[in-house]
């Protein structure tokens, strides 16, 4: 079943860059303060000098260096965001912002800075006793070890962070993850869509934006309480407005129930990769189209994009084959699947349009679509329609007979019979 709205909110909050920074900072402050209250648990012979007299100097070094490293890390992250926006697609920026490695690095450096500041303040006020200084010294050594490990990992991560291949991989993983969510909860946990019967009424929202989440569980609870049968009309990624129905329902309800049904749909200004495999395909197509522009002219990147889209569609076809309507948990909510023709247009039409001048792009498109048609015979008609469209575009732009023959041969006769 699709996630409840509150769980989705928690998951998104945990991905925010400030969330980990706050958690790490609180842990760092608690660790610095805890040394004072853990001191009575140490045996008395630990009061001897084992280096804790130098803890103040170590904390001073940490405080000054961690502030500089944190500033450097922020600069590197912003530079990667800007590079992805300029060279790839702005849609990929949200994936870079959610990168756990960069968030952990920034949070560790900020937490170490706060740990040092709190430790210095506490030392200057005599907050720690002799045994408390021992604990603070050991904690400082642990923080130094954590900083070294994080810094080495962060340096290795920066070599690829925000590069074109990294962005393509991230978008592909996000699209495949969304597809897997559909696999785990076919039709978002509802029943397969059926024709909407006569006598139904529509529920409308009040906002204009994109549907980013449909709480099928909430729809099921309302339907059970009111004796309704609900037919979902929009999926995550769809543009909605006050005049577009969010759902159709059978049964008699009041205005309060209609409003509750509409609240099961989360509408936001921007699309999210969660539950929206079409956004991943759109972002990949944007990367490929930008690579094929006259200013960039990078056919290799466009071919990498086509390969990534191929893998996403493979995952989607596996999702369709493994879907089990009988396992649906919500028997009063009917949810459609994304239309395969729309997915194909999102993925391949921009590349077919912008890649007409590059024979290698047209050939790779035909080979990819042929492979998808063989992998999913149930969707062969829609795939062949896209292949014919791409072939017609390329044929009209190709001036060389040799290139035209190569393109025709690449279709292997499948789409031109």
Image (cartoon, rainbow, N blue to C red):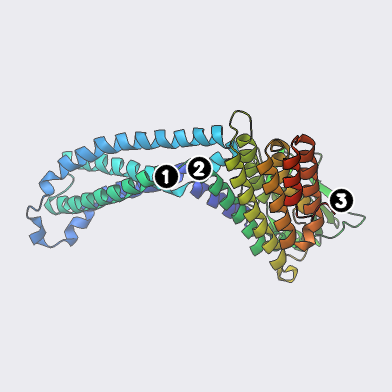
Q: CA distance from mark 1 to mark 2?
A: 9 Å
Which residue is labeled 1 in the image? 102
Question: Residue lying farthest right?
Answer: 198
Residue 319's image quarter?
A: bottom right
x, y (%) of residue 332?
78, 63
Point out which mark residue 201 bears.
3
Q: CA distance from mark 1 to mark 3?
A: 48 Å
Point out which mark residue 96 bears.
2
Q: Is residue 260 left or right of residue 273?
A: right
CB-based contact (under 8 Å), mark 1 and mark 2: yes
Judging from the image, what secondary structure is the residue with disc 2 in? helix
Residue positioned 62% across, 51% down in the render: 307
Quadrant showing the C terminus: bottom right
x, y (%) of residue 148?
28, 48
Which mark is in front, 3 or 2? 2
Residue positioned 80% across, 42% down in the render: 392
Judging from the image, what secondary structure is the residue with disc 3 in? strand
Q: How many marks?
A: 3
Disc 2 residue crowd, few under 14, some 14–19, many 20+, Cα 10 Å: many
Q: Nearer the viewer, residue 342 or 247?
A: 342
Nearest to N terminus: mark 3 or mark 2: 2
Residue positioned 80% across, 36% down in the render: 396
Residue 147 visible in the shown view = yes
């Amino acid at each position: 079943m699709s996630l409840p709205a509150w769980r989705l909110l928690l998951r998104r909050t945990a991905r925010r860059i400030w969330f980990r920074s706050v958690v790490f900072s609180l842990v760092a402050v608690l660790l610095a303060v805890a040394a004072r209250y853990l001191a009575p648990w140490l045996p008395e012979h630990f009061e001897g000098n084992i280096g804790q007299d130098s803890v103040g100097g170590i904390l001073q070094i940490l405080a000054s260096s961690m502030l500089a490293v944190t500033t450097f890390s922020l600069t590197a992250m912003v530079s990667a965001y800007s590079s992805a926006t300029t060279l790839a697609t702005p849609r990929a920026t949200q994936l870079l912002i959610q990168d756990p490695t960069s968030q952990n690095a920034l949070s560790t450096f900020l937490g170490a800075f706060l740990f040092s500041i709190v430790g210095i303040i506490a030392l200057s006020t005599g907050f720690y006793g002799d045994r408390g200084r021992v604990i603070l010294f050991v904690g400082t050594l642990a923080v130094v070890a954590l900083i070294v490990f994080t810094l080495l990992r962060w340096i290795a991560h920066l070599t690829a962070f925000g590069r074109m291949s990294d962005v393509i991989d991230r978008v592909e993983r996000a699209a495949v993850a969304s597809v897997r969510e559909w696999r785990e909860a076919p039709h978002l946990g509802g029943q397969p869509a059926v024709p909407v019967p006569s006598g139904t009424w529509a529920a409308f929202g009040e906002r204009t934006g994109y549907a980013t989440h449909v709480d099928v569980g909430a729809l099921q609870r309302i339907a059970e309480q009111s004796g309704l049968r609900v037919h979902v009309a929009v999926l995550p990624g769809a543009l909605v407005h006050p005049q577009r129905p969010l759902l159709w329902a059978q049964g008699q309800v009041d205005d309060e129930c209609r409003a509750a049904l509409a609240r099961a749909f989360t509408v936001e200004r921007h699309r999210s990769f969660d539950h929206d495999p079409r956004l991943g395909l759109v972002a990949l197509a944007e990367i490929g189209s930008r690579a094929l522009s006259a200013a960039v002219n990078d056919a290799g990147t466009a071919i990498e994009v086509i390969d990534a889209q191929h893998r996403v569609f493979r995952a989607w076809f596996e999702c369709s084959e493994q879907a089990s309507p009988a396992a649906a948990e919500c028997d009063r909510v009917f949810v459609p699947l994304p239309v395969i023709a729309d997915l194909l247009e999102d993925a391949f039409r921009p590349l077919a349009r912008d890649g007409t001048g590059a024979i290698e792009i047209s050939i790779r498109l035909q080979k990819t679509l042929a492979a998808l048609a063989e992998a999913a015979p149930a969707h062969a008609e829609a795939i062949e329609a896209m292949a014919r469209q791409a072939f017609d575009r390329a044929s009209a732009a190709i001036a060389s007979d040799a290139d035209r023959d190569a393109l025709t041969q690449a279709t292997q006769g499948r789409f031109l019979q």
